[in-house]
Image (spheres, grey):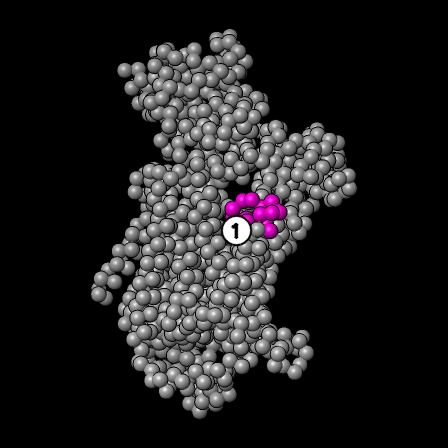
Amino acid sequence: MRRLAVLLIAAVLAAAPFAGAQDVQIGSRAFDISRNLRCPVCTSESVADSSAEIAQQMRGLIQEKIEEGLSDAQIYAFFQERYGDWILLDPPKRGVHLLVWLLPVLIGAAAVVVVVSMTRRWLAASARTEPVSQADLDRVRAALAGAAAGPDGPGTGDESSEDG
Amino acid sequence: MKASRTALIAIVVTAIGALFAFGLLRGNPDDRNITSNLLGRPAPGFTLPLYERYWPDYGETFSLQEHVGQPLVVNFWASWCLPCYDEAPILQQAWQTYGPQGVQFVGIQTQDRDKRDEGRTFIARFNLGFPNVLDNDSLVGVDWALYGVPETFFVDASGKVVAKHIGPVTAAVLDQQLGALLR
Amino acid sequence: MFELQLGPLGGASVFLAFGLALYGAVAGVIGAARRDARLQTSARLAAVAGFILATAAVVVMQAALLTNDFSVSYVAGHSRIASPTWVKVVTMWAALEGSILLWAWLLTGYTALLAVTAPLSPLRPYAISIMQAVQVFFLGVLAFIANPFKVVPLPPLDGPGPNELLQNHWMMAVHPLLMYLGFVGLTVPFAYAMAALITRRPGTEWMAQTRRWTLTGWGFLSGAIVAGGWWSYEVLGWGGYWAWDPVENVSFMPWLTATAFIHSVQVQERRRMLKPWNVLLIVATFSLSILGTFLTRSGVVSSVHAFGNGPVGPAFLVFFLLVTLAAFGLLAMRWDDVKDRADLDSVVSREGSFLGVNILFVTLTAAVLLGTLFPLIVEALTGDKVTVGAPFFDQTTLPLWMLVLLLMGIGPLLPWRRAEQQRLSRNLALLAAAFVVSGALAWLLGVHKVYPALTVALAGYNLMSLYLLLSGALAPRLRLANRGALQVIRSYAVESRRRVGSMIVHFAVVIIALGVAFSSGYRVDEQIRLDFGGSAEFSGYTLTAVDRFMERTPARISAGAVIEVTRGGKPVTTLRPRLNLFGEAGRTVPTPAVYYTATHDLYLNLNSSVGPDTTFVVLRVVKSPLVTWIWLGGAILLLGTVYSLGGGRRTVPARAVAGEKREGAPA
């Protein structure tokens, strides 16, 4: 009875998704390459990450190509020739893909430009504040000199500022 | 100034809404309706082992290269693929119609490693008359840039791939494509 | 005989809670507009009652799950008798309807807590009403679109159980809970920001009142992201923890904007600047969390974790558009009130560095959003299908992360307003020295890849920064104090909780950065075949397949290989990578076995089936350095967040309290 149960389990697990598992040895370079290729039958998974049969076969194929002496670029080209740019998880920097590479750079640059222009305005606003008389300035200097000996002394930024 | 700001917000939100509405209406993002790189190019050749029942007519292997010169229908399937069960009888019927007119059909079982028994059962179930082979390593599938099964390719008499159909093939698609090839 | 039916009971609770939310949202706004205290109080009571009803719905769902009541549609669709109790409990958030119930419940809980504890202010009634308006959406979805309490006329004898990948690891119990706690927590500052715009009080009031909520929400969200990574690592079997999948990205974007927010609000607190910008950031955080739910629940983008098409997706889309339109519309209407009349003394100052933080995090968010949506945009415009994968996100975000680390070191050292030249030069020299020394050390020790080496250099630089911060704060105290050093340190840590908390969090970020840089930069992947009894070498280890094993629990069947790991002939550990099968109809889930060490992990996953007649196994073997540091860093980060929250409310000067009392405002 127990034996039967074990056999049943075994049958179920043997029908696992690895009917097509490659029993070849696959090296790190093949995994590195397959990390940049999209598994054709999966939903947004790489050939390296997927356990789909075709992904396993493709890893084996990449290993074979490596052993034949092909370069990384040649292996990518092999898949690209068949599947087009779609197979490359690393979008090529041309055509419509160029946009996805350029836009973040442009957005970052735009953010910098906006902040710089605003900063300029603010700096000007600060410079425009009312003039200080020499007497006031001397008083403040004296007060600061006294404060420097306080508990928050030199070394760091504004210690009393409590920021999280 | 205020009006233009409001208008800008409205435009941006509308554009985002339109984009996502398109996303919702377009259906499954994972359908593989992608133009094949193969179209207009010579069909990738292969030689694969045939199932026994075809040995008397075709020998033990099937080579695509030997059939250049006649229009070809190349169908990829797998024993675990449910839509393949829908299209198999349609392919068999089309084979009976177009086979005599000189069109060669070939079925390729792929992404189905070592599933020979399942393959035989599938073929027997639909009594498929056209030759079927097993692509045990799924590498012919890679050569044909397969995204999944079933997929069906149409090859003209000069050996060029002229069309690709993704998903289960229908009689209408077969009639249309083969009508064009035979004209 | 009367029999209690759980389905209608739960459904009724949801429906009543929906009604109360609707009432509260309307009554609160009218009450605030007419200054009608009774109406406002009734809205607050509705918030408390709504929480009680939502709790009832959750209790009913738990009862249905635990008693295997398959007449409740959600239980029939997602639970299984044989599952262990903890799986049944967490099944509530293992699928769509239940996770919306969880979200709605947490939202009612936060709203009730707010209604009870929030100090009286002109903002409060509006803020609570906005929370209730958000409740109206979630409870409405539950009541009308995705009702988990539908009655199944012919209940099945057993259900399919939750998704295999979810019941395969206890982390799945934690991750969604943290995520929703984070999203809901960040709804509070959003509600207050909207209230501030409505009442034309865009000052620091709204952020001062929500500081704890914001930080709590941010902490939960951070925890959720780390927990999600750990779950991926322990379950998915590819040896990684982050794949830039759309589902991951959409949880990451609100975190990015929330991180920008918690830094940026400080500029407003201290310098009364960036008012509209802070509103913008919190609106973005909230609407991105709704957008994320829409994207993952509608199947609009291709994702491993996508959930099927359903009417819930469009509902979230409409809500997202409404929120965005309303929030930005309101901001535009109130622009003249919020507009900054700010001035800046110098860019080289604390506020200057926070401006830099904003630029970096906004660019990061934009890059992630763009990469996630790009395939959709291209398809909408041209019909072509294109791919944007992990390498894109790595290449675009890595330089930005390096700049984040750079800013993180210098920013806290700069004083507000203007840095003093002499002190600044000294600090910069020390920071540069730490950068160069640690970078050179890493290079000499063989770290020759750009990003890992740069990360080490920046880690050294950041540690120097933390040292300068601490010594700068402690040295004068020690010099002046007549107490022992330990006491001085303790009193500093208690007095400056926010500052010390932020140092702990920044330290955690350094640890996580090192973990990420090394585990992705120096990861080794191999697939090896082992005959039973045979051995193979892998990265200094010897792996021997000793045996197969099979075991059965009521909930699952497992089969796997017993792999003995030795190093230089000495036994290290025994790992048991396995295949789990939950229920006969389920799908087999390979479950990796991991040997954790402080310097690297050894990760084994089965890539072949195991049966009584198998003679060999195929293993995916991964060695990745410093992965543990990420989980450790995550824990430290949470510790820092909790530390900075702890210790009771910030002491209010006695004068202010007296003043409030005089005005007769009840607490």
Quadrant in which the C terminus of chain B appears: top left
The kind of residue tagged 1 is Leu
Examine the rendered structure and indicate whether residue C495 appears above or below residue A107: below
| Mark 1, secondary structure of its residue | helix
Provide the residue span drawn in magenta.
Answer: C441-456
Q: Name the residue beneath numbered marker 1.
A: C454
Locate residue B30, reporting x and y percent: 42, 39
Instruction: Please indicate, yes or no, whether residue C466 appears anywhere in the rendered image.
Output: yes
Residue at position x 37%, y 69% in the image: C274
User: Magenta stretch mostly in which secondary structure?
Assistant: helix
**Please, which residue is most extreme toward the top here?**
B56
Marks counted in the figure total 1
Residue at position x 47%, y 37% in the image: A38
Instruction: Left or right? Give the position of C559 relative to C278.
Output: right
Locate residue B71, reporting x and y percent: 36, 15
Locate residue C485, reporting x and y percent: 66, 76
